[in-house]
Image: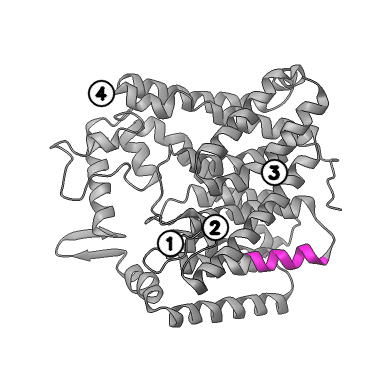
Amino acid sequence: MSISIEKSIILILSFLIVPSLITGPFLPDSFLVIFGLMILYKKKFFKEIINTNFLSTILLFSCFYLILIISTIISENPSLSFESSLFYFRYLFFTLSIIFYFREYKEAPKLIYFSIIFSFIILISDSIYQLINGTNLTGYSKYQGQVNSFFGENKDGILGSYMSRILPIYLSLHYFLNPKQKFFELVKYIFIFITVVICIFTGERAAFIYSIITFLFYIFFIEKNFKTKFLIIGIIFISICVSFIYEKQYYERFILLSKNALNFSDNQITIFSDVHTQHYISAIKMFKDRPILGHGPKSFREQCSKLNYYSVRSCSTHPHNTYIQLLAETGLIGFILPFCVFLFTLFKLSKFCFNSVFHKTNIENYKVFALLAIFINLFIFAPTGSFFNNWINVIYYLPISLYLFYTYNDKNLKIVVK
């Protein structure tokens, strides 16, 4: 494969992978696979595995992959579990490809950055149109009064999850590329503000929490201008109030339902909702039966209907919490590595916050926002999609790839947006 063809493919994929998430899981997963396979043609890559810290990343991932395979083999339905575990190694190849090719082709990070700007502008415009007219530009109606743009009438909502998870990735690339034009600074402020507001109109409480985490982190630890801080806080506070007044259902969903998210009454504990609670109870019972390696990836959907684990509302495709799902399906051993990654990001972010407040040290903001994106994806106190979902794993591994790219990147490398 010639260098020009290889470079063209990498740059095209770099631009397409984030916007393709709007179409569903098939395209982004296909692009991820192609991206990952590209490094198999590079002799230089295999040399760098030996000479850099790539090896530690490969070993850690390989251990996790081996756990998934063993858990699958000993499960009651290996064919079902293999659907999630057998080709899970593609995420390692994707991560290594990002690290390697972003060092080779400086245009690649810029293309992802511009593709996010493009995606956000399209989604924001379409969401505003749908909010005003009731349907979006392709004819999708609001679902129970909630905006979901091109993601369709999905009862769980995806628009808010997409924007709130991509926002810190965008901010990471923004600070890495460090564009000098004022236009890009204005776009940054608009995206932070609009993401919070749109997450309200989607009705997605978890997405709203993620967007607020990013907003507060930016305001208190990144933005240095006091007037700008005050202005942004004021605008967002007023917008939230107006949103609740505009539609009573948003107030009921975000305020009244959230008040009952953790409820202790009649000697029963309700977490988020009765349905979520029943999922969690069923998954915990599964974990107690097979605590070491679990019942196998993707097994919750079958196991939850069994007498030992079943209750009226216990069954679903997954238990709607990453860590409870991992405990039930991969056991304590499969749970450890993702949880350690979460603790690592929590430690790094806490250290950054401490240094920012007390030592006023200059820290690379692009690394911090990549860590924040990982932290949000693995946030322990929120309902989540399935850990093995193709769509969400593209979003999981993109900030991990970026953080590792920054870590392994030569210090003298400069990429400038022109």
Label 4 vs 3, first from the N-terminus: 3
Magenta range is 182-191
Q: Is residue 300 left or right of residue 94?
A: left
Residue 220 visible in rendering: no
Label 4 vs 2, first from the N-terminus: 4
Dot 2 corresponds to which residue? Answer: 164
Mark sitting on residue 204: 1
Residue 183 magenta-drawn? yes
Count of marks overlaid on the render? 4
Tag 2 and tag 1, C-beta contact below 8 Å: yes
Label 4 Cα neighbours within 10 Å, binned few <14 / some 14-19 / many ≥20: some
Tag 1 and tag 4, C-beta contact below 8 Å: no
Residue 380 placement (x, y as % from top left): 43, 50
Name the kind of residue labelled 1 in the image.
Answer: Glu
Residue 360 placement (x, y as % from top left): 73, 62
Label 1 vs 4, first from the N-terminus: 4
Dot 4 corresponds to which residue? Answer: 76
Estimate the spatial distance between the alpha carbons at disc 2 and disc 3, rounded to whole Å: 19 Å
Estimate the spatial distance between the alpha carbons at disc 1 and disc 4, rounded to whole Å: 35 Å
Name the kind of residue labelled 4 in the image.
Answer: Glu
| Element type at mark 3 | helix
Mark sitting on residue 15: 3
